Structure formats: C-alpha cells, structure tokens
Image (cartoon, rainbow, N blue to C red):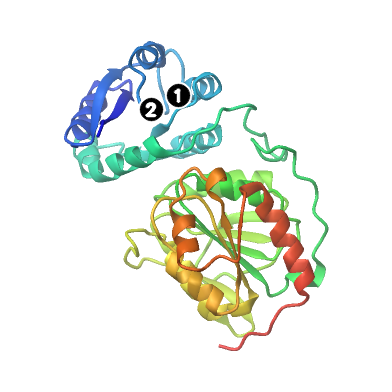
Amino acid sequence: MSKIKVVVVDDSALVRSLLAEIINRQPDMACIGTANDPLAAREMIRELNPDVITLDVEMPKMDGLEFLSRLMKLRPMPVLMVSTLTERGAEITMRALEMGAVDFVAKPRIGVSSGLRELGDEIVDKLRIAAKAQVRRLTAPPPSAGSGSAGATTAPTAAKPFGRLSTEKVICIGSSTGGTEAIKEILVRMPADSPAIVITQHMPPGFTTSFAARLDSLCRISVSEARDGERILPGHAYIAPGGLQFRIDRSGANYVAVVEDTPPVNRHKPSVEVLFKSAAKVLGPNAYGVMLTGMGADGATAMKEMRDAGSYNYVQDEASCVVFGMPKMAIQAGAAHEVLPLLQIADALTERIRSSGGAVRHRI
C-alpha cells in the first residue's frame, strides 16, 4: 500500500518541523516536503504531487485564503487548514471551508510544541480522511452576506411561508467533515418561518460562534449557538457549541435547548448521537432527521431510533458528500427514508412538511 504523501505549508519553522515529525511517525503517510510560504508551496506541489497539504491560514507573501482560492480553481486537492484559536482565525477558517478546504485543526497560541504533539492523533486522522475526500473545483467566489450559497447550480429562491405548519415541527441535522458547507446549502433555502432547526456539527470550541454568525448573515432564518435553557422556536436554527453536548427537551408545552458539559459520545463533543437520541425521545413524529457528510458513524444508531419513534429522515447521497461515512452508516442502520443529493434535500424537506399538515401532539 502506498503511503499518503503530505506537504506542510507554514511560516513557522517549529510548526513545520513538528507536523513533519507527527506525520512521519505514521506507517501509512510521509511528509514529502515543507514550505515556508505559498509561493514555495506552489512549486513543491507541482513537482511532488502530494495527496494532501496542510496550510496555515496566515502566511507571508500571499495569505492562506488567496493561495487556497487559486489552488482550488487551478489544481483542486485535499487541504487541511491549520488555524489559530482566535476570533480572526475562526473567521478565516470558515472562509477556507467555503473555498473547499476539507477540514481544519486549531493550533494553540501558547505551548505550540506540546500542544501540537497532543493533537497528533487528531491531525493524522484528519489527514487520512482528507486524502480520501471528494474535492471540487472552486468555480465562484464565496458569497457575501445575503447573496445565497456558493457552489449551488442556481441561487436559492425565496421559499413559500409555512404558516402555522412550523409550530411544533423540528428539523434535526447532524454532520461532520464537509458539513459546514452542506449545512449552509440547506439553511439558505429555508423560509423565514421555517420550523425550528437544531444542528450538531463536529467542531471544537472557539469556532462555532463564527460559524453561526456567518450562517446568520446568509439566511432568512436566525442562526445562533444554542444556549442552555432557551426556547426552541420556529424561524431559528440552533448550533451545538463546540466542546459541549447539545440536546433537546420539553418544558411544559415548549421545546428547550439543553447545553451541558458531559463526556464525549462516539469520541465527539458535541455528538450527533446525543442530539438525535433526544429527538427520538422528545419529538417523536414531530421530528425530521437530516444526516449530512462526515466521517465515522456518529448518530447513525440514534437516527434509526428517530425513525422508529415516527420521524421522517433524509440522508445525503455519496456523490454529493465530501466524506460518505456518517450517511453510509445511517443508511446501513435502516435510518433513512430518502437518500438525496445535497441540493435536493431542502426542497424535499419543505414539501414534505407542507404535505404532512399540522404538528402531531406527542406525549412523552
């Protein structure tokens, strides 16, 4: 079996050395080159033809975003961003994911040497996933606020209002690698009075705030990080905060968010399994499940529990996934009612909600 060939692009000699060391310890991968700026990286990529590159978000001579944009237009390939745990770093990372980066890791601002070594397993796991990911050529610039979604074949049009149909229905979305863009493609197509939407996207602390703010600027619905105890309302989407678990519960006649610092489930925090299990218990037939691109099996078992409790479930198809892991496992678990290309899910979902009539009063 040939090794995964990695090129490391970072302006820090220490980070380049540490990443090369972490990569070269793996029996199935090799760091075949390091570059201290994008111009050197461009020549190295041309000569060495790597399977995946790591790319710092802030670089000399040409910033990481500009280099990524050119790369994804001219020579699309898997890219793992190396981000800083700052507000600016998080915003840049969200833009990089829009441009086609497969995933990211967050390097610590202090204690870089020990911090990166502690992240070693996560880094090599994400490199393995990235090397197998389906990447697409960047054909248009990422959208500005209110302009709709990048990469869609047509701009999303205003959907018809739901009216009172949305009162007790809740859409539950789970995703991982590639999910930030997949979630956006669905949310920008939802009308302002959409049923409430609850979302778990695998993401570390410090990045979900920027993710929610970016979506809120693009969508007709309001998008925010979930806060413990807040009411789950139509016309709003709630994203699990990075590093915390998120589930839905009932308080009297209302649905409420529960955000808590409990252990990882399926190695994830937040975990799709936690959200979907609560949906099966609390929402029953008032839930709609959506499983999007991602590695692993998180949420598959719980999505089957949702189906058994009466929910109607959509799963993203392999051709439109960046990584066909979580959707594949949900299908194998018997959780899916429909398997659809990403750009068809929102329309199918809204039409089904309209045709299903009013909410079901679900007794716990």
| View extreme (front): residue | 1
- Give me the disc on residue 225: none
- Give me the disc on residue 56: 2
Classify 10 Å Cα crowding around label 1: few (below 14), some (14-19), many (20 and above): many
In the depicted structure, whether residue 156 falls above or below residue 266 = above
Q: Position of residue 261 (x, y in %)?
A: 36, 66
Q: Position of residue 4 (x, y in %)?
A: 29, 31
Could you tell whether 235 is left or right of 82 in the image?
A: right
Classify 10 Å Cα crowding around label 2: few (below 14), some (14-19), many (20 and above): many
In the depicted structure, whether residue 55 falls above or below residue 299 = above
Going from N to C along the chain, the mark reached first, 2 or 1, is 2
Quadrant location, the N terminus: top left
Toward which corner of the image does residue 78 lie, by quadrant? top left
Residue pointed to by mark 1: 64
In the depicted structure, whether residue 197 falls above or below residue 178 = below
Q: Which residue is found at the position 30% from the left and 40% from the top?
A: 123
Toward which corner of the image does residue 122 lie, by quadrant? top left
Q: Position of residue 124 (x, y in %)?
A: 28, 40
